[in-house]
Image (cartoon, rainbow, N blue to C red):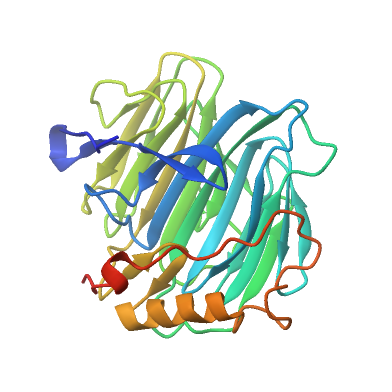
Amino acid sequence: MSTQVASTEGGSRVIDAVDAIVGGGAVRRSLPTRAKRTIGAWCFLDHFGPSDITGQAGMAVGPHPHTGLQTVTWLLEGEVVHRDSLGSEQAIRPGQLNVMTAGRGVAHAEESPSSHPPILHGTQLWVALPDGQRDREPAFDHHPELPATNAGDWSGRVLVGSFGGVTSPAKVYSPLVGVELTTSKQASAELALDPAFEHGVLVVEGAAAVGGADAVGPDRLVVLPPGRSSLDLAADGPARVLLLGGAPWEGPLVMWWNFVGDSAESVERARADWQAGRRFGATPFLEVPGATARRIPAPPLPFGRLVSRT
């Protein structure tokens, strides 16, 4: 499916998500696409479900590696168990946040527990680590509660950064904001924005009008350039959106498969280490204790090598 882009007022754009497969499951990917690679340091955004997994295994993403990024997992329905090469084992449920800082290298697996709720629905986001933090020691943090706020008729939950007078406990390494906004009825609000940030509003459920433009439906991302200090958000009925923002990314950024680096060579080294059973765990090829899904090998490099993009 090709990326569809429509222009709106004030320099904003509407980008349709593209279909992708992750761990055998279908997702809709809003970042990166040909039309937009990053929003601040936010460099990846997948929306999966809602899926009825009654009588099925559910999520079964086997051990796989990451470098140079943070994974940010936000569930809307269901339950997923995170395991990683640091020895972490943590269930995540709606309203909770998992943040894994890959740094120089970590492996993890994400699986539905054997006794799981019938519906699975959520988002998976990545944050690119800036220069100076990209090779830091890996870490994992679970946040069972996040601060709540209100914006007009919308209820907000702050995943990352500060919004509406409250600040998330999640640790990130770039100027960022991430907020879930929901309403169960007709709603409107004027959201205060940091004008130094670029922003994106992803409609997850229902439909929402962003910045006074026509309402857009699920899996459409409204991208807003820096310079805006406020944004009108409206819905005629139940809706859920994600507001993401950050200082525009500066410097090189190479993304391929599950790796983020500052050069093609650094990503190629990470792939070679994963294939050889190095770097990503104390025990070669058994990096994630307790995972039941199969280890995921790296795909072949395109044309045998990568080309850096700045």
> What residue is drawn where x is 77% and y is 55%?
292
The residue nearer to you, when weighing 152 against 18, is 18
The residue nearer to you, when weighing 4 against 127, is 4
In the picture as drawn, the residue positioned furthest to the right comes out as 115
Residue 72 position (above or below residue 70):
above
Q: Where does the image place residue 24, in percent across and percent down from the top left?
A: 56, 42
Q: Where does the image place residue 283, in percent across and percent down from the top left?
A: 73, 81
Q: Is residue 165 left or right of residue 38?
A: right
Residue 257 position (above or below residue 117):
below
Q: Is residue 280 left or right of residue 9?
A: right
Q: Where does the image place residue 211, in percent across and percent down from the top left?
A: 26, 32
Q: Is residue 3 left or right of residue 94?
A: left
Quadrant position of residue 219: top left
Question: Where does the C terminus fall, quadrant-wise?
Answer: bottom left
Residue 242 position (above or below residue 175):
above
Question: Where does the N terminus fall, quadrant-wise?
Answer: top left
Quadrant position of residue 175: bottom left
Q: Is residue 263 visible?
A: no
> What residue is drawn where x is 66% and y is 42%?
59
The residue nearer to you, when weighing 91 against 238, is 91
Marker count (numbered): 0
Q: Where does the image place residue 291, in percent across and percent down from the top left?
A: 76, 59
> What residue is drawn where x is 27% and y is 63%?
248
Q: Is residue 128 visible?
A: yes
Residue 30 position (above or below residue 169):
above
